[in-house]
């Protein structure tokens, strides 16, 4: 029954010049989100509002679902946009709207008129009262409740008259692209896709890097990461995914360094390579799915050891989350089922039985000197041979 949506977005942080950047990014992300939806749409900005109008028949549920993935949207209002052809026509439009939208009329209501177009001849309060009467006459089961109505009938008088009573929550946050770019270390696990989602929610565009170790990790493990990136990209927009062959580096560390330090040292090389790509593509930080204490490589000491090799900030949006909380988000965003597929990831094959939980920086640095003969060359090769996939 609806041909248009009125999009409400947050006002915080979008004063002055930033406002149009915020709105343009939001429009761009809405277009991206609607691209796979059946139907054609026009998107327009008008006085602090964004309207989406369907130009053809369209799949309402699919459109709504897509819009609920656009960060920056706080409310999605299915709206009737009526031409201003006098009060009687307006009253008729509102009655038609209520009749179609609410099959059961045992409801309390309140009319809330806003005159954004000041030249409209009737003051808002008078419109409220007159429309209220019309509604009561048309639908005897409906009653007025000005304090706590079941439905708030919004009538906004703008270029066209906007009639809506439903505000479907959006995801909140800020439009992707309004807060720079970050490089996500994306593995096949539960955590890192959620970390990417959470950073993107604050307006950060993301690229990603995945380290694989063929033949120890399979093509299916790689495909799983690609599939996860695709799900995350539904929220973030296109993701440039770097796939780095990490086998030689991993084997070399395995040969030369104490096995209980393996994970930490490997993690340090992942960070170094990720940072190289981040700089190359103008990312402003690295993003991981780590949370304090989750595993041996995520104690405060281990995280400090990983950070030491980075000059960029490392963002860990899940730092204070329990596993169960992370799982809940992953279910909500649709990555969970893919994340739990059983394909090995490159870290599980080489993990020591008793990894260090409190690595000393001095010790780790000393162990890394055992790698000095070949490691620079290996890192260079890993960077040069990395594959880039654009995920849409
Ligand atoms: P996840 O569920 O994200 O795999 P995890 O609990 O398994 O996390 P670790 O394996 O210790 O944790 O990895 C910690 C973080 O390091 C991950 O969240 C991810 O950001 C990064 N990471 C780990 N392995 C890889 C990999 N093969 N490629 C890219 N990033 C990785
Ligand atoms: Mg993992």
Image (cartoon, rainbow, N blue to C red):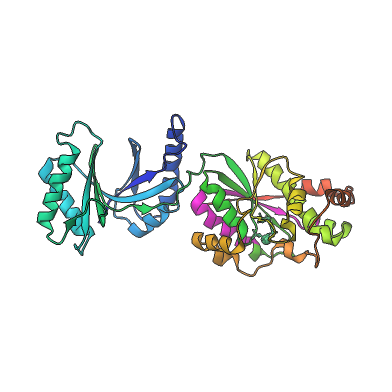
Q: What range of the chain is rendered magenta?
A: 222-248
Asked where in the image residue 342 lies, by quadrant, the reply is bottom right
The reply to whether residue 238 is visible in this rendering is no
Question: Residue 295, percent across and down?
Answer: 71, 61
Residue lying farthest to the front in this orientation: 147
Question: Residue 256, percent across and down?
Answer: 88, 57
Question: Residue 269, percent across and down?
Answer: 77, 50
Classified by dominant secondary structure, the portion drawn in magenta counts as helix
Q: Is residue 230 shown in magenta?
A: yes
Q: In the image, what residue occupies the spot 78% across and 45% down?
A: 380
Q: Is residue 313 shown in magenta?
A: no
Q: In the image, what residue occupies the spot 81% across and 49% down?
A: 378
Residue nearest the observer in this picture, 125 or 270: 125
Q: In the image, what residue occupies the spot 53% across and 59% down?
A: 329
Residue nearest the observer in this picture, 31 or 104: 104
Question: Residue 209, percent across and down?
Answer: 65, 51
Residue lying farthest to the bottom in this orientation: 342
Q: With 149 as the anchor, is 212 left or right in this view?
A: right
Quarter in which the N terminus is drawn:
bottom left
Q: In the image, what residue occupies the spot 33% across and 52% down?
A: 167
């Amino acid at each position: 029954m609806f041909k248009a949506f009125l999009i409400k977005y947050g006002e915080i942080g979008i004063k002055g010049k930033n406002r149009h950047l915020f709105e343009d990014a939001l429009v761009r992300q809405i277009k991206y989100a609607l691209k796979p939806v059946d139907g054609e749409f026009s998107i327009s900005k008008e006085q602090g509002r964004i309207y989406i109008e369907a130009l053809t028949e369209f799949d309402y549920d699919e459109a709504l679902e897509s819009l609920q993935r656009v960060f920056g949207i706080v409310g999605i209002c299915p709206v009737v946009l009526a031409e201003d052809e006098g009060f009687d026509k307006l009253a008729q439009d509102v009655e038609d709207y209520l009749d179609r939208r609410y099959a059961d009329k045992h409801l309390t209501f309140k009319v809330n008129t806003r005159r954004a177009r000041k030249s409209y001849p009737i003051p808002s309060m008078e419109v409220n009262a007159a429309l209220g009467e019309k509604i009561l006459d048309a639908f005897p089961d409906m009653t007025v409740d000005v304090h706590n109505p079941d439905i708030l009938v919004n009538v906004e008088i703008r270029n066209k008259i906007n009639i809506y009573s439903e505000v479907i929550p959006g995801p909140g946050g800020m439009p992707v692209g309004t807060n720079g770019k970050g490089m996500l270390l994306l593995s096949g696990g539960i955590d890192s896709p959620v970390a990417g989602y959470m950073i993107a929610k604050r307006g950060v565009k993301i690229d990603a890097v995945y380290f694989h170790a063929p033949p120890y990790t399979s093509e299916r493990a790689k495909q799983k990461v690609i599939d996860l990136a695709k799900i995350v990209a539904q929220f973030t927009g296109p993701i440039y995914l770097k796939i780095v062959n990490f086998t030689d580096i991993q084997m070399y560390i395995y040969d030369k360094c104490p096995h209980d330090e393996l994970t930490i040292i490997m993690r340090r090389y992942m960070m170094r390579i990720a940072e190289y790509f981040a700089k190359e593509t103008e990312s402003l930080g690295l993003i991981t799915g780590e949370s304090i204490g989750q595993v041996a490589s995520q104690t405060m000491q281990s995280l400090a050891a990983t950070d030491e090799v980075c000059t960029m900030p490392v963002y860990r949006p899940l730092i204070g989350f329990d596993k169960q909380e992370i799982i809940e988000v992953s279910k909500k965003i649709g990555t969970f089922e893919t994340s739990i597929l059983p394909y090995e990831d490159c870290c599980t094959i080489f993990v020591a039985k008793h990894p260090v939980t409190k690595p000393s920086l001095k010790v780790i640095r000393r162990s890394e000197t055992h790698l000095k003969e070949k490691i620079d060359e290996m890192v260079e090769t890993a960077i040069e041979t990395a594959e880039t996939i654009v995920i849409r």
